[in-house]
Image: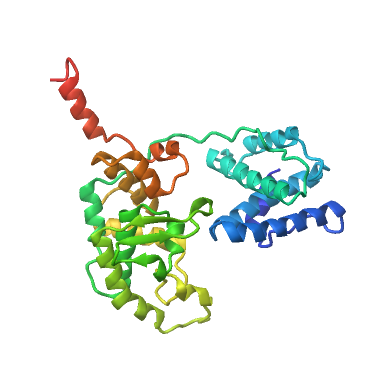
Amino acid sequence: MAGFISLMAKEKSPYLPLRHGSQQGSVSARALRLFEDDLALRYAERTVPEYLAHVRAFLLWMEAKGLTLTGLRKPDLVAYQSELFTLRKSDGKPYSAGFQGNSFTALQCFFRFLSRRQLILSDPIAGLERPRLETRLPRNILSTREARKVMEAPKARSPLALRDRAILETLYATGIRASELIALSPFDVDTEDALLRVVKGKGGKDRNVPLTRAACEAIEAYLAQGRPKLLTAERTGSGVYPARASKRLFVSPRGGTLHRATLSRLVSAWAKKAGVKKRVTPHVLRHSVATHLLKHGADIRHIQALLGHESLTTTERYTRVEIGDLRAVVKRAHPRGR
């Protein structure tokens, strides 16, 4: 089983190493190709390879057990879930509940696709309970003062500083995910109406979110004086960048694609430069804006719409009562608090 999971990371092709020469391997590979085409039309770019990896791992497990897509039953899916649950990483730690949940969601999507295409008679995953996620509080939440310090850290007028200021302001203004920010194009931003359009967010859904005045100003400065210079920067090394890279709103120092790791590093670097001791990531800014809005009276359903959560329960996990507020309530209302 561990071998199947490790192949998810090692194999570049989503169709290999399904068994060559076997009828079942051919059927699985064809189903996977059709599924990929369907995903590309309905889901975000980052979601497609992740879902394919989970489905491919399941198909490898299925072949090893001598099972077929048309012969799958609910107990087979239960057995697979059980093996995932007992699986351990190289360091001996179990895979997270998030990993289990993502695997379940990918397979759920895959079998629904097969059912729609009438490639299977019944959906074997229907009725199965999704693995429960941990409802942990975020480890780091910025105070409004800390958030302001991070936003104002890039003070220079260089192209990269203008880009980074626009990135920070956009993340904190909207609470969008890192993958959603990376996928933005200049056409998704309307600073005149202070609106940002997220295309194919999580779950393949579009949504419009408002921008703050500070975010609009930062984006306008970046579009006028930052992005054009980054796109025309001298290219060294291989000098090869995909044509689609320059179509993104936020680009790399030489006009290429901005990657998630780069985004995380720049957010963390500016937080350190601002003197914030906490570990700050794009997701910490997402947690923080949700908490700040709730603290200042925003309705939780409005926060749900802003963050693009399908379930209100998910939004509640992103918010929390500040311990300072709770301490004040106890001091005021507890019989022995005064």
| Residue 162 percent across, percent down from the top left | 29, 70
Q: Residue at x 72, y 46 (%)?
A: 115
Residue closest to the far top: 335
The count of marks equals 0
Quadrant in which residue 329 is drawn = top left
Q: Residue at x 36, y 55 (%)?
A: 209
> Is residue 95 or residue 328 the one in the foreground?
328
| Residue 220 percent across, percent down from the top left | 28, 71
Quadrant in which residue 268 is drawn = bottom left
Q: Is residue 57 left or right of residue 244?
A: right
> Is residue 142 or residue 200 the one in the foreground?
200
Q: Residue at x 43, y 76 (%)?
A: 255
> Is residue 12 or residue 113 the one in the foreground?
113
For the C terminus, which image quadrant? top left
The vertical placement of 169 against 94, above or below, is below
Q: Residue at x 65, y 33 (%)?
A: 128
Q: Is residue 318 left or right of residue 121?
A: left
For the N terminus, which image quadrant? top right
Say if residue 275 shows up in the picture: no
The vertical placement of 132 against 194, above or below, is above
| Residue 179 percent across, percent down from the top left | 46, 58
